[in-house]
Each structure stands twice: as C-alpha cells, then as structure tokens.
Image (cartoon, coloured by chain):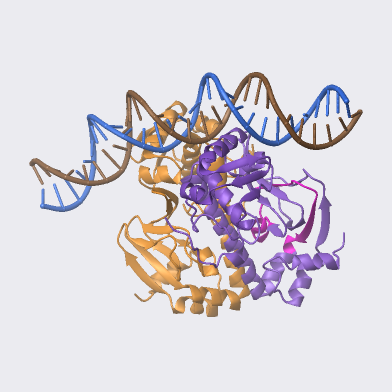
Chain colours: A orange, B purple, C brown, D blue
Amino acid sequence: MPIRASDAERIDNISFFSNAAAPTRERVLSGAFLQRFPANTTLLLEGDPVDFLYVLLEGSVELGAGWKSRDTTLAVLRPVSTFILAAVVLDADALMSAVTLEKSEILMIPGESLRSAMKQDSAFGFAISEELSGCYRGLVRAIKNQKLRDSTERLANYLLTQRVRQGETDTIVLPHEKRILASLLGMTPENLSRAFAKLHAQGVSVEGARVHIEKPAALERLARPSPLIDNHYAQSRNEFGKAFTERQRGTLDRS
Amino acid sequence: MPIRASDAERIDNISFFSNAAAPTRERVLSGAFLQRFPANTTLLLEGDPVDFLYVLLEGSVELGAGWKSRDTTLAVLRPVSTFILAAVVLDADALMSAVTLEKSEILMIPGESLRSAMKQDSAFGFAISEELSGCYRGLVRAIKNQKLRDSTERLANYLLTQRVRQGETDTIVLPHEKRILASLLGMTPENLSRAFAKLHAQGVSVEGARVHIEKPAALERLARPSPLIDNHYAQSRNEFGKAFTERQRGTLDRS
DNA sequence: TCCGACACTTGACTTTGATCAAGCTATCGG
DNA sequence: CCGATAGCTTGATCAAAGTCAAGTGTCGGA
C-alpha cells in the first residue's frame, strides 16, 4: 500500500524523523510501504532476520520472547512507536517476537534505506543514536524494576505511572488485558490478582479494567517510585521510553 | 594525566573508534585524559549528571543500582569497554552507579567532544549507533535471562558461556568474587552456593574460584543455552555485548 | 438464545528463593 | 604467630511466587 498524506503526518510523531532534512526523508520513505494487520498476527518471530524497521501507526503490538515453554512480554507498544531498531542498525536477527494485539497499521521501512540515510546525514544519524539511547535507558529501568522490586511493588509502581500518564485521575483504565499486564510485570495472572488484593490496604480497588486509587499517598509510600527506575512522563506508553523525554531531571526522591 | 602512545594503542580496541577518521580521532581525544583509580572507588553514583564517556583500559568496573536498601549488579566490565554511552549521547543523568573492583585505568572523554564528533562525522555516528545497538541487545538478553530462567538455570548458562569464552576447557575460573556473581545473576550468595550444589548432579564441582565441568553435555541438557539469550562469543566479558560480534548467526537450538 | 471459549479470581498446595544464624577458612595486619 | 575481618557455606525457617484445580462471568458465534 502506498503512503498517503495522512500517514506522512503521523510519521512526524517519530522523534528521530520530525526534524529530518528533505533528502533524508525521501531516501528513507522511498522504499517504505504501509501494511494493515488483523489482531493476533505474528509480525516477527525471535530469531528471524530483520529486513524492515517497523513503525506502529495504529493499533497495538506486543514484544515478547520465549524459552523452554515459558513466555514473557517485554513491552506493549502504542502509536506512534518504532520497534526492532537495534536489529535493523546491525542487520541482525530479532531477539524478540512481535505480535499485533489489535488490528494495526504499520509502516515498514527497508533496513538498508535507514542505514544508508544514517551514513549520509549525520544529523539524522545522531537522532537515531538519541532514540537508541532512550530505548537503552528504558531497558536499564526495566531490569532494575525486575531485579530490585517484588511483584507487588512492581504493580504499585505501574499503577502510579499510569496515573500520571492518564492525568492524575483517581480512576485509571488498564490499557491491556490483565494476563498481558501480568506477563509484562513478570508474574502469573493468578499472582497479579493477589497483588491487587494486597494493594487493597493502600486504597486500590479493581473493577474490570478500571482501577480506583483511593489514597495515592498510601500507594506511594509502598511503591516508592524513583525517577531512576520509573519514567512517569514518557511520551508514549512504550515501556522502552523515548529519547526526547529522557532529558527531564527527576523530581522524586532517589531513595 | 596526558594520553601516551601506549594508551592510544589500547584505544583502538574500542569498536567504534578503530576505524575513525583522523580529524574525528583528534576531536574526540583532544579534551580527553587518563585517570587511575584504586579499588573500590565510586566513579559515578546513579542520578549523577554524566559529563564524560568512560573507557576502561585496565582493571575492572562494576555497574550497579540500588533501591530501598536493596542493591544489584548489572554488569562487570573488563578492558577494553566503554560505559554510560547512552547517558552521554542524551546528556542525561546516570541510571547506574560505577565502582572500580580493582585498581583501574580509565580514559575520560568529554561528552561534548563525543557528541560534536558524531554530528560532524556520519561514519563515526553510525559506529556509535552500532555500539548502542549492541549494548541494547545485550540488555534484551539480560532481561530474557532474568524473566525466563530460574536461578539454577541462570548459573548453568553462565558457566557454559564462561566455558566457551575460556576456550572450551573442562575447568573454568570465575572472573569475580562469588558475591558479585550472585548479584549479577540476581540471587543471594547463599542461593548461589545452593545452585552450585544442585549442579553437582550435572558434573559441576567447585573449588574456590575454579569450577570443574565434568559432563558438559549434561550441563547443557539442563541449561539449554540459546543464541537468542546467551552471547557465547562476545568479544569481551562485558555482559552488555559488543556490536561487532552481534552479526554472527547463532548455531545452537532456538528452543 | 444458548453454548463454548476464554479471561479472571480464589483456594490449596508446592516450589523457589530470601532471611537469619552459625560455623568454617583464607587473608591480611599487627 | 595470632587475631580480626570478610568471603563463603550450611542448615533451619519464613515469605514469595508458581502450579493445579475449581468456579464465575462475559462475549461472540452457532
């Protein structure tokens, strides 16, 4: 499918693309095309060679990985997000699988176009480095979250992050199914239920996908959010973070 | 301390530097200087602003992080490795602390020099992107290792990785103290001892820092190493991987 | 409309890992 | 040479998380 004007508009939401020079934009988009996928479509299996940079324009995509019959979710992406950038830069095999969670619209940019644009235009290359750095730091946060906190603490911090991103409201809406959230937080669905139950003492009550946070202060006392782990103000809900919001200095305690 | 000829030689072991053009090398190294540190020196505390790119030329450095009285090791670096590259690219605060484990020699490159060289020389910028991508993929491997395997499986795979890197010998030498290894693998020292005891059934015996692997095949049957998690052939022992070895296709099963 | 998935929850149980408390050993400084 | 410290190991106990099984509710398709 060719790229339409309305798509070109959305592409400008990609941090490393919005300021690119005209010749670079043309080089990158010349071989690109738009694809629509139904829900639950596997876009990429871990181990596959990666020929394209993917840009999610509409819908949502889960990045995951498996080993020995176990599976885990590494991130859930929302528009506008790019994914498997690192594999494209290195022209290497994917380390994560990508599956659509909803009907999705995805722009596919040939890896070779991207690499040649980076080699041609140093400002563009620098913007890609910024994006990669932001993603890297998002992963550092994820590992710290995983290794330093138990499952209830991870849930509590997840809720607080969502609260900020959804505008400090007292009732937030979980953006995906609980089984996906459980996998993202590194626990079983059964344990997620129990973690919610434990947070009842901190004023958290659940009703389907709606989560009411009665006493944010109490929840924070347990969660102890830290700007060195939690990225409350990421531009998108992409757990891997965004380069452009990384610059902000944290304001919470550094415990 | 000024940079000597013998240091310049070692600097060429940095993947993204060895092919840099002369003007770029000069720009990057002009404001750089060499520092020696004793063991157990804190180079950087998480949350600190980062003004320099660090290049470890001699010794070893632990990257770690803490939260709520807990601490964890994210990587142990050996020469020649760079660290906190992502923070330098974004001119952001460090997300990890860095502490020398031994007497170390470190080259410090002003962040501004690095960034301006990237903006000037697109080939250099591309090399940095490759390095960042390799580090990113190293972290993806680390998260998968942490979320998909239990502690005994992580130890078993660690041992197999060391075995390959130390030349397929039947006796490997642990490169750091067991308490650091435990923290790196995400467990307590007590549990590391017990994990070693469990692997006795797979022909693993320990004597101080020397680990004898009697039946590699039995150990592999339990460990199930995967090229999508374990990077057996990384150039250095840096757990975060290296861009230049990422290109290799794996040869083991993808389970 | 009814049926069958499937997501979610709850309870009982098992496994895994952390904590606490000794003890053991190697190393280093006096 | 001795004593202190720190790393490591072991056992006992406890807490956290996974597994198994049963039951509820919802949604979409026949």
Residue at image coords 55%, 77%: A116
Residue at image coords 83%, 55%: B35
Q: Is residue A156 magenta?
A: no
Residue at image coords 47%, 46%: B222
The answer to whether A235 is drawn above or below residue B13 in the figure is: above
The stretch in magenta equals B83-112
Is B188 left or right of A219, judged from the image as shown?
right
Residue at image coords 83%, 66%: B6
Residue A244 visible in the current orientation: no
Q: Quadrant of the C terminus of chain B?
A: bottom left
The answer to whether B76 is drawn above or below residue B14 in the figure is: above
Is B96 left or right of B1, judged from the image as shown?
left
Q: Quadrant of the N terminus of chain B?
A: bottom right
Q: Provide residue B21's location: percent of width, then percent of height.
A: 72, 77
Residue A127, quarter of picture: bottom right
The answer to whether B120 is drawn above or below residue B254 in the figure is: below
Q: Provide residue B169's location: percent of width, then percent of height.
A: 62, 54
Residue B114 visible in the current orientation: yes
Q: Provide residue B89's location: percent of width, then percent of height.
A: 65, 61
Taking depth in this image into account, of B46 and B180 the one nearest to the observer is B180
Taking depth in this image into account, of D22 and A77 the one nearest to the observer is D22
Is A23 left or right of B76, judged from the image as shown?
left
Taking depth in this image into account, of B155 and A189 the one nearest to the observer is B155
Taking depth in this image into account, of B110 and A144 the one nearest to the observer is A144
Number of marks present in the image shown: 0
Q: Provide residue C7's location: percent of width, then percent of height.
A: 31, 43
Q: Is residue B107 magenta?
A: yes
